[in-house]
Amino acid sequence: MVLLLMCLAPITGKAQTWQNVMLKRQITHPQPMTGLVLWPEQARNRHSAYGKSIQLEFAYCLPCKVVKGCAEDGTIEYDWSSFDALLNEVAGRGHQLIVRFRYEYPSGKDVDGQKGTTAVPAYIKQRNDYQETYAADPGGDGPTYYADWSNAELQRFTLQFYTDFAGRYANDARIAFLEVGFGHWSEYHIYGTKVQLGVNFPSKSFQKKFFQHMKSIADGMPWLVSIDASDDTYSPVVADNGLMMLHFGLFDDSFMHKTHEIGTTGGYNERCWNSIGKGTRWRKGVCGGEISYYSSSDQKNFLNPEGMYGHTWEEQAAKYHITFMIANDAPGSTYGTARRFREAAMSTGYRIAVKECKTDGTVTRLLVTNQGVAPLYRDAWFAIGEVRADKSLKGLLPNTETWMEIAAVPKEDGSDIHIVSDHILPKQEIQFNADIEGETAIRSVHAANAPTTCYNLAGQALSRPTHGVCIKRTKCLVLK
């Protein structure tokens, strides 16, 4: 028995010999769930030129368009067909949608053709205890009606609506992210109108309930709020440690405008990022937004390689760990070429790379890093064929690395190593960088044709392998 143990001891060690696997890959386009973003109409009209330069589209969506009524027991009655048609159109271009539901839109005519009509469902508007307020020209943006936040049914509906939405769409690959909020365009402000909490803007107590509710229902879908939620005139978030700990992301609706940064006049936007983001929110929550419309030229000029207002796009995308940014008016401008769009889009989000790839003939190990400016916020896995790695790429921070193990052996050229995700479309691909030279003749220990030589305890070669004990290029001892 002692002799047997002594003879078998070296076998285990030899079975763990690791060999490099050839792996050659290159990231050639913006990655799913990242990049510059167009509205569906612009994406449709410019698809031939810009379709491969973007991965995302953005749309406001209206609760009143999908809600048909409410049953006596309180069940909300829906018709999601128009929303699904939008999702299918966007997905048909190989893109995912960023969704933002809203109630107020100054001068917006998409509810009933009248300027400023709220998108509150009709069944609520028909209640005797529901009364909206009105402003003729708040902030110079035109006629605006405001939802009645004193109404208990509007509050109940809002919570139930997001519950029902998440239940239906939280794991729908056609949707990348969800933006939520209140006020004009759901951007957490009603500039030009006197704020009346609990009347034309939700009370802070309801907002707290809403944030806690979103945490409970939307963990499967990354959700974001405006950086304006840092303003305690409107919001309870910054003053509440419990709310600050939630993993929501941030969107900035006037990114890179002239006074965006501290050191310019005011620096309001950067102060908001610092206040509600604390410099670390990007680690768990998606960061994005929209290039400024403060000047009609901002969207047209922000891609200037020389910069705008003293800052380049790449610099700002890295500083704020941007995953996506709406840039609907940039295409066709001097700097908004399809080539520049693609280049700028690739400066956002995650960028996966493999530094080492090894196999022992049974499993494969990858040393993976993130060369991007932000993590991946949804699950994705390295895989060999259908076999996924033991850990997800979700949350891998920039400039960090981790080992991952796959219980399979790749082809000698590594061609069957890829990244899979349940949160991307069939037309999409998560790419990665790799430049690894391999060793020849890598095979699984379970391969039927693996060359083996086996010996018994007397040192005599056996004529055939015995129950898979023999290992490639290893002299192993078996009892005869």
Image (tube, helix red, strand yellow):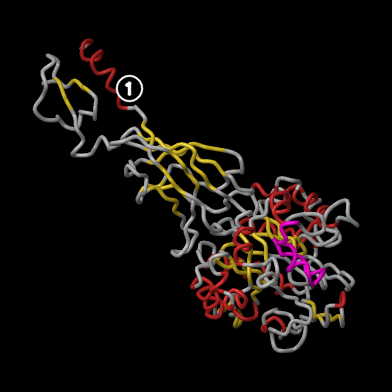
At a point 76% along the width and 80% down the height, the residue shown is 130
Mark 1 lies on residue: 13
Q: Is residue 403 above or below residue 324?
A: above
Q: Is residue 199 above or below residue 380?
A: below
Whether residue 438 appears in magenta in the rendering, the answer is no
Describe residue 191's horizontal placement relative to residue 378 as left or right: right
Spot occupied by residue 194 in the image (x, y as percentages of width and height): 90, 71
Image quadrant occupied by the N terminus:
top left
Q: Is residue 60 visible?
A: yes
In-front residue for pair 10/441? 441
Describe residue 231's horizontal placement relative to residue 479 as left or right: right
Residue at far top of view: 2
Describe residue 283's horizontal placement relative to residue 182 as left or right: left
Q: Is residue 145 above or below residue 331?
A: below
Q: Is residue 387 visible?
A: no
Mark 1 is surrounded, within 10 Å at the Cα level, by few (under 14), some (14 to 19) or many (20 or more) other residues, namely: few
| Disc 1 residue type (three-letter) | Gly
Describe residue 179's horizontal placement relative to residue 142 as left or right: left
Helix, strand or loop under label 1:
helix
Spot occupied by residue 243 in the image (x, y as percentages of width and height): 73, 52
Spot occupied by residue 379 in the image (x, y as percentages of width and height): 51, 52
Spot occupied by residue 126 in the image (x, y as percentages of width and height): 71, 86
At a point 10% along the width and 24% down the height, the residue shown is 462
In-front residue for pair 383/277? 383
* Start-end of magenta stretch: 289-306
